[in-house]
Image (cartoon, rainbow, N blue to C red):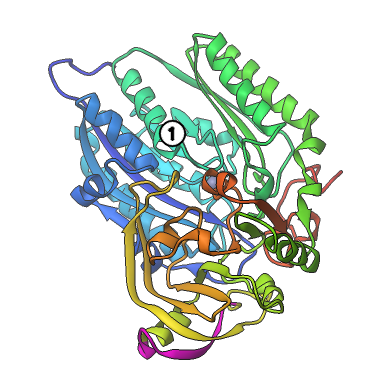
Amino acid sequence: MPADSEKPLRVAIAGFALESVSFLPGAASIADFEAVTYRGDGLTDGLRGSQSPGGGFIDVLDAERVEIVPLTYADLGAGGNASDEAFVHFRDEICAGLADVRDGIDGVALFLHGAMTTPTRTDPEQEFMQAVRDILGPDLPVMVASDLHGNIDARFGDLADGLFGYHYSPHTDMDETGRRAARALVRMLRGDVSPVMAIRKPDVMLPSIFTATSIPPLSDIVAEGFAWERDHDAIVDVSIFCGFAYADVPQVGFSVVVVADGDQALADRAAESLADKIWTIREDLLHEDMVSGLPDGVARAIDLSRTASRPIVLLEHADRMNDSTHILHEITKYPGPRIMVPYLWDAAAAEKAIAAGEGAEITLPVGGWSSDRAGSPVTLTGRIVYAGDKSYRGTGKMWNGYEIRLGPAAVIDTGDVVVSIVSRYVFAIDLDPFTQFGYDIDDFDIVLLRSKTHFRAVYEDIAEEIIVVDTPDWGPADLTTLPYRNARAGLFPLDR
Ligand SMILES: [Zn+2]
């Protein structure tokens, strides 16, 4: 029922997110999530104006003069499993928050990644939403914003009034996705729309490296989603979820989600048409020719760097934990080029460097600790040019305004290679890893990144060439090398 127009609407906002490589050992703890958690007024202060779904919620609710009821927002980004304890802890905290406020709110805006797993759960987000529904009852409107890499179960539509995924990877529209969800919520609360949802799942999954939405034919599918919105007034929103292939779950892979105003048949038709198209072009979505082998790719980068006027980007894309050493081992065989290796995740190495102090010479093994596929540690000998706790507000296209916390960090310069070592899992996707430490990317011949698609928003314009190298790690381009047990039968490219 539309709220009384005299009384301001009240909307609770919350978020709980992690993109989980289910194959990795270990699991994110409560403390890992706590390090990135916002609560209460800290949530609105911390996320307002940021390029995040929560930032988008706040933007629209502020503009629409809706009173915000901030609960808990914990976005850990990407990694391995969440621990079952952490999942239960944050599920229960957010549900307790909703139970406290449910009689005084008109709706809820949630951010869930869509590809979280725990050691014992293949779809914790479905369970989370069921718990939210159990608290709120069937009628209170709930809109959910999610990541383009979410593995969405078709039954999610029974629990949420609308689901909105990022349109792009790199995710330059995280805030806009939050706005889409919040706008639909406000329109629903004012009685302007009656959302219905259709979810269809073609049996297709893709390695993350091929989910860049600027590359055809995926770009054509995204454009076709926009065309459905443009050509049909009753279609409120279309999301093409590419899914996350490194989560071994029954619902892995693409999903098409269409939110329509009252017209279920139209939503079904649009979702089916887009899902059919994805199935039809599945072979063309797998750009296997984009990927080089390890020694060849590195040798080519070295060759190109001798004559290039701009930096070469080497992409160790299969590294899911930012600590793999396969390319670092290979590239240090070639003295000469100046190489930047930003944001290698190794908290123990960072602590040792900080103990030695800025200006000290150090010999230190780094990386290669997260699993037996990460490669052996690389021993660096060089000067410590930065040592200390580091956080900053992002300036790049994707993380503009978002607080980036690296934790205890150190930068070591060996003469040829500059490695920044961080204690928090953060991807280097823009120029902040250079500028925040006083470096200029133009002083480097080669940059070693571990991003999948997000770096493209900045580096496509900067790099002389991007060389994607496949390494024997947990995020490979060849999905048939992974030990799936839960992925459903008939799924491309496992069944081809
Ligand atoms: Zn994503």
**Secondary structure of residue under mark 1:** helix
* Image label count: 1
**Quick one: label 1, few (<14), some, or many (20+) residues within 10 Å?**
many
In what quadrant of the picture does the N terminus appear? top left
Front residue (pair 104, 213): 213
| Residue 302 locus on image (x, y percent) | 71, 66
**Residue that numbered label 1 is attached to:** 177
Residue at (25% x, 37% y) in the render: 102
In the image, is residue 67 above or below residue 123? above
In the rendered image, residue 276 lying in the magenta stretch gets the answer no
Would residue 400 appear left or right of 207 to someone viewing this image? left
Residue at (52% x, 73% y) in the render: 418
| Residue 143 locus on image (x, y percent) | 40, 32
In the image, is residue 316 above or below residue 171? below
| Residue 40 locus on image (x, y percent) | 21, 49
- Within 8 Å of ligand 1, the CB of disc 1? no
Three-letter code, disc 1: Thr
In what quadrant of the picture does the C terminus appear? top right
Q: Which residue lies furthest to the left in this view?
A: 6
Residue at (28% x, 16% y) in the render: 190
Front residue (pair 168, 461): 461
Residue 303 visible in this rendered orientation of the protein: yes
Residue at (47% x, 79% y) in the render: 412
| Residue 165 locus on image (x, y percent) | 51, 35
Q: Quadrant of residue 310?
A: bottom right
* Part of the protein shown in magenta: 355-367
Residue 134 visible in this rendered orientation of the protein: no
Q: Quadrant of residue 447?
A: bottom right
Would residue 194 appear left or right of 309 to someone viewing this image? left
